[in-house]
Amino acid sequence: MRNIVAAFLLIVAALAITRTPSGSDAARQGIRKAVVQCSVSPLRPGKQGNQVVATGEVLCDRPGPQKLTYTVHLQRSPDGKQWTTVASQTYSAAGADTTSERPVSQRRHTAAAGCTSATWRTTVEWTTQDNGATKKGSDESGSRRNVC
């Protein structure tokens, strides 16, 4: 019987020592909650009518960040080396609007310009704000020549 009591006391002591802080304990100890992760993807430009269209797509882990802002840039280069932004649009979303709870069509946004002969690419810049943390990033698509 003594072995059972001793084992029980050891288990209780181990739980007390290794318990994970929560709520106000976590705040007092400076432990931060996890920040939602997001992926913002630039798609290669395509043609719609007589325009070149750059598309950016967002997908975040649930429940989504408190705020996501991203800008889709359509860039043109005559030589494939120097890039100029010819159109851009900025979008904001939060929470479930950034997750797979919404269809892809609601998580994709565009910037467009008139067709001309050139090499084109899409770039995206984004900022997420969640649980007091701010993350920034950018990415670019592969280029596409003579979309028009």
Image (cartoon, grey):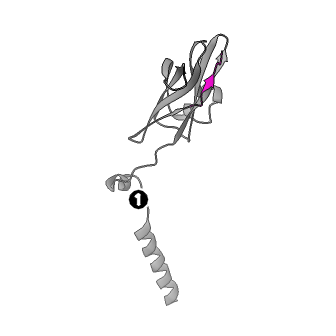
Residue 55 in view (yes/no): yes
- 120 to 11, vertically: above or below: above
Residue 15 picture location, percent across and down: 45, 70
Q: Main secondary structure of the magenta part?
A: loop
Residue 111 picture location, percent across and down: 55, 19
Q: Quadrant of residue 132?
A: top left
Between residues 116 and 99, which one lies in front from this camera angle? Answer: 116
**Helix or strand or loop: what does disc 1 sit on?**
loop
Q: State the residue lying farthest toward the front.
A: 79
Residue 109 in view (yes/no): no
Label 1 CA crowd tier, 10 Å (few <14, some 14–19, many 20+): few
The residue segment tinted magenta is 141-148
**Residue at image point 48% right, 76% down:** 11
Please check the rendered image and state whether residue 80 is part of the magenta-colored stretch, yes or no. Answer: no
Q: Quadrant of residue 100?
A: top right
Q: State the residue lying farthest toward the bottom.
A: 2
Q: Which residue is mark 1?
A: 21
**Residue at image point 48% right, 28% down:** 70
The quarter in which the C terminus is drawn is top right
Q: Is residue 103 left or right of residue 58?
A: right
Between residues 40 and 50, which one lies in front from this camera angle? Answer: 50
Amino acid bearing label 1: Pro
Residue 91 picture location, percent across and down: 50, 24
